[in-house]
């Protein structure tokens, strides 16, 4: 019996001379492996439909806990804008690797739509750095290291918040501030907005460069300190960002 699943190809591996296995993050079953017989052949219509970062409906003979068998693919949304730009591809590569790790940690059904919503907005041309940081913030609770964005991490004071610090783990008020770097007040406010915003409702992003850089720097240091994740794609993305 053929099963239709909605999914996003996160990786592909050659299998023999003409076939390959794709790993697909699916809405229905999480991450599954699918055997694509003959998909490497130049004559196979599946060749172009089973490339990494393909998002579509996959028609498979589903086998729980084993390799499923691919029958056909209907592409839902081509990512032509992203896949034609090396910088955007670097962002997508990182976000895909991060998403796999977050899903493996939490197995939450919320991960799939969150990830796709950011990919779609990136394809529409919205700022990839801001979108990446929004998703990074939203992923933190699934990794068990969510931010407290309601009060000072030391005293619980909800007023006079003056900065956010990765080593401290969140907001600091003026009474608890020691020698930590003081960020822009707009940065303090925008981090909270990043957490609460509904990604699908975003239609434009106009955020000051210094605010974006402060938020990105905070999240880089917070992830390094609290998540235990080391992703090669993140290192490559940092090199791209520095060019």
Image: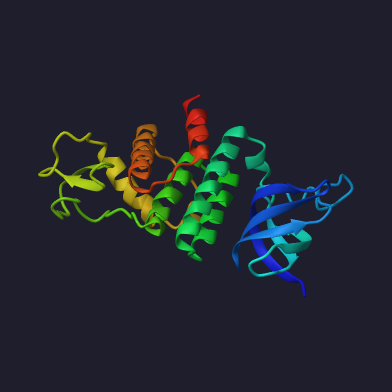
Which residue appears at 65% of the width and 70% of the height? 64
Instruction: Judge left or right: residue 220 versus residue 110.
Output: left
Q: Residue furthest left?
A: 175
Query: In the picture shown, does residue 59 fall above or below 173?
Result: below
Instruction: Judge left or right: residue 38 versus residue 170.
Output: right
Instruction: Judge left or right: residue 85 versus residue 98.
Output: right
Which residue appears at 33% of the width and 54% of the height? 145
Percent position of residue 233, x then y: 53, 38
Percent position of residue 179, x then y: 16, 33
Q: Residue furthest right?
A: 43
- Asked if residue 183 shows in the view, the reply is yes
Query: In the picture shown, does residue 96 fall above or below 74?
Result: above
Coloration mode: rainbow
Number of numbered discs overlaid on the protein picture: 0
Name the quadrant containing residue 224. Answer: top left
Which residue appears at 16% of the width and 51% of the height? 159
Q: Residue furthest top?
A: 243
Percent position of residue 176, x then y: 12, 44
Location of the N terminus (image quadrant): bottom right
Query: In the picture shown, does residue 18 fall above or below 103?
Result: above
Percent position of residue 32, x then y: 63, 61
Query: In the picture shown, does residue 161 fall above or below 23?
Result: above
- Asked if residue 121 shows in the view, the reply is no
Q: In this rendered view, identify the residue nearer to me: 84 or 203.
A: 84
């Amino acid at each position: 019996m053929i099963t239709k699943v909605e999914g996003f190809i996160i990786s592909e591996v050659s299998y023999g001379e003409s076939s390959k296995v794709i790993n697909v993050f699916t809405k229905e079953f999480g991450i599954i492996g699918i055997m694509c017989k003959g998909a490497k052949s130049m004559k196979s219509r599946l060749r172009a439909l089973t490339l990494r970062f393909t998002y579509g409906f996959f028609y498979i003979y589903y086998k729980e806990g084993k390799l499923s068998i691919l029958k056909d693919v209907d592409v839902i949304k081509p990512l032509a804008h992203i896949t034609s730009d090396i910088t955007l591809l670097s962002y997508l590569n990182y976000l895909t690797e991060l998403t796999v790790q977050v899903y493996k940690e939490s197995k939450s059904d919320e991960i799939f739509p969150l990830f796709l919503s950011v990919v779609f907005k990136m394809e529409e041309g919205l700022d990839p750095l801001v979108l990446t940081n929004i998703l990074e913030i939203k992923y933190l609770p699934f990794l068990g290291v969510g931010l407290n964005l309601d009060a000072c991490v030391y005293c619980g004071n909800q007023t006079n918040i003056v900065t956010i610090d990765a080593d401290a783990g969140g907001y600091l008020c003026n009474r608890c501030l020691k020698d930590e770097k003081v960020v822009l007040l707009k940065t303090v406010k925008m981090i909270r907005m990043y957490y609460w915003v509904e990604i699908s409702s975003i239609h434009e992003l106009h955020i000051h460069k210094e605010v974006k850089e402060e938020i990105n720097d905070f999240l880089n240091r917070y992830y390094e300190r609290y998540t235990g994740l080391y992703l090669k794609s993140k290192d490559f993305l940092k090199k791209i960002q520095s060019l």
